[in-house]
Image (spheres, helix red, strand yellow):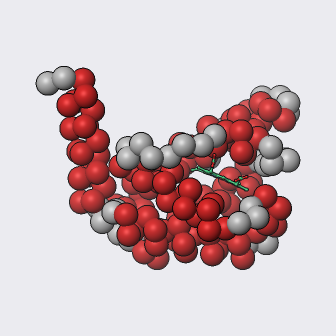
Amino acid sequence: MTATQHSVAARDAKRRHAEALGIDDAFIARMIERFYEKVRRDDVLGPIFAAHVIEWTPHLVQMNRFWRSVLFSSGEFVGSPMLKHLVIPDLGRADFARWLRLLEETLSEIGTEAARAHVIDRARNIANSLLAAAIVHQGDGLGPSKTDTL
Ligand code: HEM
């Protein structure tokens, strides 16, 4: 098997695994729609997004691409999530924890427990990377309470 064939096979296996849990393109679209409805209504996260997102449709399209790339390795996401979050002032642990809670709530409304666990696991890993970068960027030092993972 060539390297290309190997990566195509790995990508197919990843998609099949997700689809076996009920996670397909339609599931992701539903998750994004419901999740951002909650985010926009949220007392803390709503205003942060409102300050940065002028047009929601392109953001939601971009988030669909992002999650299909994460969950299926579809390779269609092009962006710079690290930079986009570093420019948001004072983004911290409580904000990420809230974001994750809303995503969990969304997932428990639309899918099985296995689907929820699968998506949340990936979201938490990414949230931890974004949080770690934010802490370093804000120059807050690296005390233990700051570096504990979410
Ligand atoms: C407190 C938590 C978070 C807040 C307030 C937040 C806020 C934002 C905002 C305002 C944008 C739009 C930036 C722009 O287009 O100018 C954005 C983009 C994005 N966010 Fe978040 N976010 C949070 C957590 C996360 C997490 C945990 C993930 C991933 C699991 C994530 C993934 C993304 C991605 C992929 C983009 C698009 C980046 C790009 O187009 O380059 N966000 N976020």
- State whether residue 25 is above or below residue 137: below
The image quadrant that residue 63 belongs to is bottom right
The image quadrant that residue 131 belongs to is top right
| Outermost residue toward the left in this view | 1
Expressed as whole percent of the image width and height from the top left, the position of residue 17 reads 26, 52
Q: Relative to 150, is 92 on the left or the right? A: right
Q: Quick one: quadrant of the N terminus?
A: top left
Q: Relative to 70, is 13 on the left or the right? A: left
| Rendered residue at 68%/61% (across/down) | 98
Task: Let me know if residue 143 appears in the view.
Answer: no
- State whether residue 4 is above or below residue 25: above
Task: Let me know if residue 68 appears in the view.
Answer: yes
| Rendered residue at 50%/46% (across/down) | 77
Expressed as whole percent of the image width and height from the top left, the position of residue 58 reads 62, 62
Expressed as whole percent of the image width and height from the top left, the position of residue 89 reads 85, 47
The image quadrant that residue 60 belongs to is bottom right
| Rendered residue at 63%/75% (across/down) | 37
| Rendered residue at 57%/69% (across/down) | 35
Count the labels in the image. 0
- State whether residue 123 is above or below residue 48: above
Q: Nearer the viewer, residue 96 or 39?
A: 39
Expressed as whole percent of the image width and height from the top left, the position of residue 2 reads 19, 23
| Outermost residue toward the top in this view | 2
